[in-house]
Image (spheres, grey):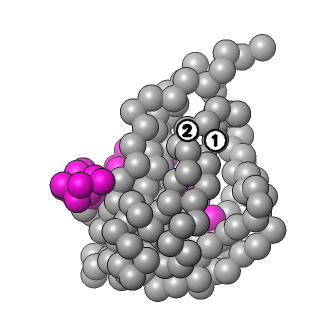
């Protein structure tokens, strides 16, 4: 039996685009932003809208790529239109975050991960509705973030120029 997954460097931050340095913390201080450079086992657009394209080294594939299983009954591939900026990376991240998958419980399963290896996970969100809609994020059965409300992290429901990210090492 494998040891339980250990999670570290858990961050909940906002971002204003796909380029380096376009992040901010809960006090709206600048942070590094999304990490789109390096080797990616998976970069997935969780939407039936299909592949979103490449932002730096992250090539966002369609959700039906081998090794990925998404369980979420509801899907709106064009939920909203975020406007992060005009760079090629901004455009890709806009497509990744314009859709919404939802259900009482959403599962994302990834195969091909090697026990004992280190991985970084980044989950991107964009919310323009429902001020108090929050949810818990679990990984391998362990609670990672409790009552995560994306629009609180991104700076409000009317902020079309920012999204929210949960990142961690596992």
Q: Is residue 116 magenta?
A: no
Report helix, strand or loop for mark 2.
strand
Instruction: Give left or right: position of 109 versus 153.
Output: right
Q: Is residue 20 visible?
A: no
Q: Which residue is mark 1?
A: 138
Of all residues, the one furthest to the front in this rendering is: 132
Where does the magenta region start and end? 23-46
Q: Residue at x 34, y 60 (%)?
A: 14
Q: Which sits in the foreground, 28 or 99?
A: 28
Residue 54 pos. (x, y %)? 44, 66
What secondary structure prevails in the magenta region?
Answer: loop
Gap in angstroms between the C-alphas marked 1 and 2: 5 Å
Q: Is residue 29 magenta?
A: yes
Residue 96 pos. (x, y %)? 51, 70
Q: Which sits in the foreground, 37 or 97?
A: 97
Report helix, strand or loop for mark 1.
strand
Q: Residue at x 67, y 69 (%)?
A: 101
Label disc, if present, on residue 89 of the rendered structure: none
Q: Which residue is mark 2?
A: 144
Q: Which sits in the foreground, 130 or 127?
A: 130
Neighbourhood count class around disc 1 (C-alpha, 10 Å): few under 14, some 14–19, many 20 upward: few
Q: Are marks 1 and 2 in contact (CB under 8 Å)?
A: yes
Instruction: Give left or right: position of 80 versus 30.
Output: right
Q: Residue at x 23, y 59 (%)?
A: 28
Instruction: Give left or right: position of 159 versus 45.
Output: left
In the rendered image of this protein, does residue 51 appear above or below residue 78? above
């Amino acid at each position: 039996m494998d040891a339980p997954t250990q999670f570290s460097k858990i961050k909940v931050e906002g971002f204003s685009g796909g380029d380096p340095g376009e992040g901010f913390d809960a006090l709206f201080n600048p942070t590094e932003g999304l990490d789109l450079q390096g080797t990616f086992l998976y970069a997935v657009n969780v939407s039936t809208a299909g592949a979103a394209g490449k932002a730096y080294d992250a090539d966002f594939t369609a959700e039906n790529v081998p090794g990925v299983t998404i369980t979420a009954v509801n899907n709106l591939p064009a939920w909203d239109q975020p406007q992060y900026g005009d760079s090629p990376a901004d455009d890709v991240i806009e497509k990744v975050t314009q859709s919404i998958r939802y259900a009482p419980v959403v599962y994302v399963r990834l195969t091909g991960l090697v026990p004992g290896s280190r991985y970084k996970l980044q989950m991107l969100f964009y919310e323009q509705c429902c001020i108090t809609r929050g949810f818990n994020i679990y990984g391998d059965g362990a609670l990672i973030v409790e009552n995560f409300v994306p629009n609180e992290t991104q700076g409000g429901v009317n902020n079309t120029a920012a999204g929210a990210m949960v990142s961690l090492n596992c």
